Image: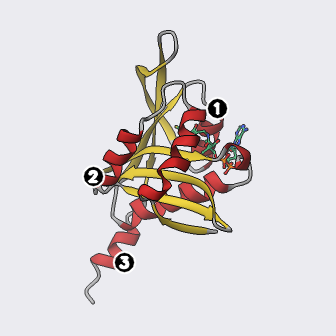
């Protein structure tokens, strides 16, 4: 398995996942904006095949997981969990106090993955996601992070 930073060459593969996963998917422009803004964004490949992606805005206070997706045919094989663990480590190394994210109330798969990795519900954003008819609420989930990695790498005396 190989991780790399997301770039323009991954856009077609990302859009394929995104379009298949969401009734109102992010556009190519949305993904390009994330790349332009320099968000922490990883691509996961296995034997040169694109498997999935994750995008996170990192901040020392609160990092925000903005999107994550795995190829439809490769779901349920542990890739999403591995990718999310990398995002958590990245936020920890940068000294974030926590990671927050939104997830549709109906997205049980993603919800289970987040709960498995220690995210907890902290609220609901009403009508956060568009649907073909109406809108759907989102759970807001948060995971508190240990701050020992930042101390180890940046705040030690040597
Ligand atoms: C959500 C997503 C990223 C999960 O990735 P994945 O590679 O399929 O997940 P994994 O195989 O790593 O599974 C990890 C955990 O997720 C949960 N999970 C995975 N598939 C599940 C399913 N079909 N039903 C319930 N929980 C599931 C389980 O807790 C699982 O742990 P377990 O195997 O010990 O039970 C993937 O399903 C996806 O791309 N979905 C479409 C896009 C999306 O919804 N993104 C999230 C937006 S908030």
Between 42 and 117, the residue placed more toward the observer is: 42
Quarter of the image where one finds residue 125: top left
Name the N-terminal-most of marks 1 and 3: 1
- Residue at image position (58%, 53%) is 52
Give x and y (percent) for residue 7.
42, 59
Q: CA distance from mark 1 to mark 2?
A: 30 Å
Whether ligand 1 has any atom under 8 Å from the Cβ at mark 1 is answered as yes
Q: Earlier in the sequence, mark 1 or mark 2?
A: 2
Q: Residue at x 49, y 51 (%)?
A: 54
Quadrant of the image occupied by residue 48: bottom right
- Residue 152: give its label: 3
Task: Give the foreground label among 1 and 3.
Answer: 1
Query: In the image, is 92 to the left or to the right of 21?
Result: left
Viewer-nearest of labels 1 and 2?
Answer: 2
**Does the residue at mark 1 contact the one at mark 2 (Cβ under 8 Å)?**
no
Earlier in the chain: of badge 3 and badge 2, it is 2
Of badges 3 and 2, nearer the viewer stands: 2
Give the crowd class for mark 2: few <14, some 14-19, many >=20 residues within 10 Å. few
111 in relation to 150, above or below: above
Dot 3 alpha-carbon crowd within 10 angstroms: few under 14, some 14 to 19, many 20 or more? few
| Label number found at residue 37 | 2
Q: Position of residue 102 (x, y in %)?
A: 45, 34
The circle drawn on residue 138 is none
Q: Quadrant of ligand 1?
A: top right
Which residue lies under the disc numbered 1?
A: 108
User: Compared to 83, does 67 lie above or below?
Assistant: above
Around disc 1, counting alpha carbons within 10 Å, would you say few (fewer than 14), some (14 to 19), or many (20 or more)? few
Q: Is residue 53 above or below residue 110?
A: below
């Amino acid at each position: 398995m190989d991780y790399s930073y997301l770039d323009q060459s991954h856009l077609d593969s990302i859009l394929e996942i995104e379009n298949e996963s969401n009734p109102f998917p992010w556009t190519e422009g949305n993904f390009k904006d994330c790349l332009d803004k320099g968000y922490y964004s990883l691509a996961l490949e296995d034997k040169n095949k694109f498997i999935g992606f994750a995008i996170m805005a990192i901040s020392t206070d609160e990092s925000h997981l903005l999107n994550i997706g795995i190829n439809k045919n490769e779901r349920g094989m542990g890739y999403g969990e591995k990718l999310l663990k990398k995002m958590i480590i990245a936020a920890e190394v940068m000294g974030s106090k926590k990671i927050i994210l939104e997830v549709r109330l109906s997205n049980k798969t993603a919800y289970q993955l987040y709960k498995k990795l220690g995210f907890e519900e902290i609220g609901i954003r009403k009508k956060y996601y568009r649907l073909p008819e109406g809108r759907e609420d989102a759970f807001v989930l948060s995971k508190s992070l240990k701050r020992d990695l930042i101390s180890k790498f940046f705040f030690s005396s040597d």
